[in-house]
Image: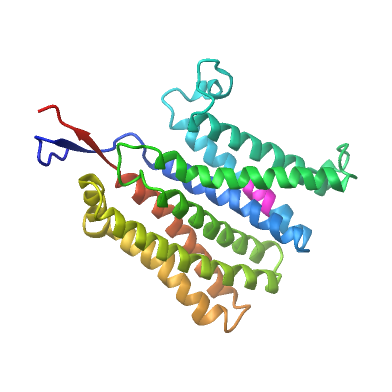
């Protein structure tokens, strides 16, 4: 435990949310945005293989992330009580998050099923109206899932570093960036459509620049915030988390991909190696961002003395 000025407060590093929650926050945002991006391209006339691949990727990744969330519980076999227990508060973010995750997986499955040859027998397979409706419902719930990954920790008021409006925005931007990166890697394997890959890579470059700006503003503001937030900022910039944040998030996850995209990919599109390396670095940086934010969480507890 860290104790500073005990006449007023205690500072305690949060011990509850660890690697499994970081894994969920990363996969939940990535999977939801991978679907949303592929659905956007599909609505704009993109290939059906992109939306099918993106939908399946989103389903698998969000499902795995949800499993990580479930196994982080003290009694994972009781997870279903979140949705059916009459004693739970339906306005709590845990309940709403569970409903968003369930809705996303349900509507994404209903949307993509008619596009798979094994499920073309489903009743709505020949109704474009129904398919589009399921797609929009999956899209909206996917946006909700991606936003929820930041809101989940942003509402923890006694951890000042987390309790800031900018944190859900950062996680949302990062989810968009990692969703693009995952689709780029997927399309490099499934269907090498150079034009779609180039557009996604260039878009990801601009998204990362925006993420870097918002992240810098967030850290600057938190460095003048409550003492616990200041301690968190010092830990990730100069303490034991600095190699993960400065080296992993800022350098590997943002700076190098931005340089590769605008210094090479934009000028010479179609170079698979550069595109793949950039996308892999983005995914590593996105995962480390969640880990660093969780580990940097410090409770500020008023002291009774």
Image quadrant holding the N terminus, namely top left
Magenta segment includes 206: no
Is the magenta region chiefly helix, strand or loop?
helix
Residue 126 at x, y percent in the picture: 90, 45
Which residue is the extreme one toward the right? 126
What residue is drawn where x is 53% and y is 58%? 178
For the point 57% across and 56% down, the residue is: 179
Work out which residue is located at the far top of the displayed protein and give it: 86
273 vs 183, nearest the viewer: 183
* Furthest residue in direction bottom, as rendered: 267
Could you tell whether 250 is left or right of 64 in the image? left
Q: Residue at x 67, y 54 (%)?
A: 54
Give the image's coloring scheme. Answer: rainbow
Query: 141 above or below 95?
Result: below
161 left or right of 120 in image: left
For the C terminus, give its image quadrant: top left
Q: Which residues are magenta?
A: 54-58
Front residue of 201/118: it is 201
Task: Tell me, yes or no, if residue 248 can be seen here.
Answer: no
Q: Position of residue 170 (x, y in %)?
A: 44, 55
- Residue 57 within the segment the image draws in magenta: yes
Residue drawn where x is 62% and y is 67% of the image? 200
Place of residue 295 in the rendered image (x, y in percent of width and height, measured from the top left): 31, 45
Q: How many marks?
A: 0
Q: Is residue 184 something one can see in this rendering?
A: yes
State left or right for residue 259 relative to residue 130. Answer: left
Quadrant hosting residue 304: top left
In the image, residue 65 sits, relative to residue 257, either above or below, namely above
């Amino acid at each position: 435990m860290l104790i500073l000025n005990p006449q007023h407060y205690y500072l305690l590093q949060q011990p509850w949310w660890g690697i499994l929650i970081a894994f969920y926050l990363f996969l939940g945002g990535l999977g939801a945005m991978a679907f949303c991006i592929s659905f956007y391209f599909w609505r704009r006339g993109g290939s059906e293989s992109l939306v099918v691949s993106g939908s399946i990727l989103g389903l698998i990744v969000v499902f795995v992330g949800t499993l990580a969330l479930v196994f982080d519980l003290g009694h994972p076999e009781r997870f279903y009580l979140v949705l059916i227990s009459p004693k739970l508060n339906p306005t709590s973010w845990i309940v709403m998050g569970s409903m968003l995750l369930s809705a996303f997986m349900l509507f994404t499955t209903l949307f993509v099923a008619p596009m798979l040859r094994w499920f073309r027998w489903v009743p709505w397979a020949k109704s474009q109206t129904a398919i589009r409706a399921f797609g929009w419902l999956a899209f909206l719930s996917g946006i909700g899932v991606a936003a929820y990954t930041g809101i989940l920790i942003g509402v923890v008021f006694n951890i000042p570093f987390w309790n800031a409006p900018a944190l859900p925005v950062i996680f949302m931007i990062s989810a968009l960036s990692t969703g693009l990166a995952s689709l780029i890697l997927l399309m490099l394997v499934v269907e090498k459509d150079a034009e779609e890959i180039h557009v996604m890579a260039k878009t990801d470059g601009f998204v990362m620049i925006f993420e870097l700006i918002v992240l810098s503003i967030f850290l600057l503001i938190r460095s003048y915030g409550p003492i616990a937030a200041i301690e968190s900022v010092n830990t990730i910039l100069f303490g034991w988390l600095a190699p993960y944040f400065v080296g992993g998030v800022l350098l590997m996850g943002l700076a190098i991909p931005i340089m590769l995209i605008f210094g090479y990919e934009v000028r010479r599109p179609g170079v698979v190696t550069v595109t793949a390396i950039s996308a892999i670095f983005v995914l590593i940086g996105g995962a480390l961002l969640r880990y660093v934010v969780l580990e940097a969480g410090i409770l500020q507890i008023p002291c009774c003395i």
